[in-house]
């Protein structure tokens, strides 16, 4: 997944992720430049999904 794609539409994707996974908090979805891996780690732990599964979910939004 291209970081530019994630950053460019992140607000929209973040809203959809929160709808799909009500367990997610605003803190889970903080996307800061250079800290994508940290955010993905939080999501992996919170949702119990692999990084590859998360990329597929985000790309399908």
Image (cartoon, rainbow, N blue to C red):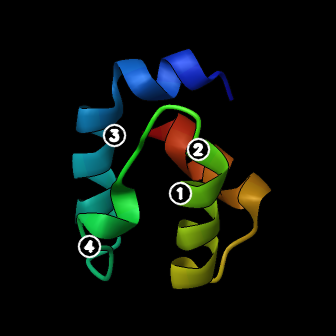
Secondary structure of residue under mark 3: helix
Closest to the camera, between mark 3 and mark 1, is 1
Q: Position of residue 1 (x, y in %)?
A: 68, 29
Q: Secondary structure at mark 1?
A: helix
| Mark 4: secondary structure | loop
Q: Which residue is mark 2?
A: 36
Image disc number at residue 39:
1
Quick one: label 4 or label 3, which is nearer the N terminus? 3
Label 4 – label 3 distance at C-alpha:
14 Å
Structural distance between the alpha carbons of marks 2 and 4: 16 Å
User: Is tag 4's residue or tag 1's residue first in the polypeptide sequence?
Assistant: 4
Label 3: few (<14), some (14–19) or many (≥20) C-alpha neighbours in 10 Å? some
Categorize mark 1 by other alpha carbons within 10 Å: few (<14), some (14-19), many (20+).
Answer: some
Q: Dividing the picture into quarters, in which one does residue 12 lie?
A: top left
Residue that carries the numbered disc 3 in the rendered image: 13
Q: Earlier in the sequence, mark 3 or mark 1?
A: 3
* Camera-nearest label, 2 or 4: 2
Q: Which mark, residue 25?
A: 4
């Amino acid at each position: 997944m291209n970081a530019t794609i994630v950053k460019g539409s992140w607000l929209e994707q973040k809203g959809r992720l929160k709808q799909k996974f009500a367990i997610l908090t605003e803190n889970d979805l903080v996307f800061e430049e250079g800290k994508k891996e940290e955010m993905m780690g939080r999501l992996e732990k919170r949702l119990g999904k692999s990084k590859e599964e998360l990329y597929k979910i985000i790309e399908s939004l």
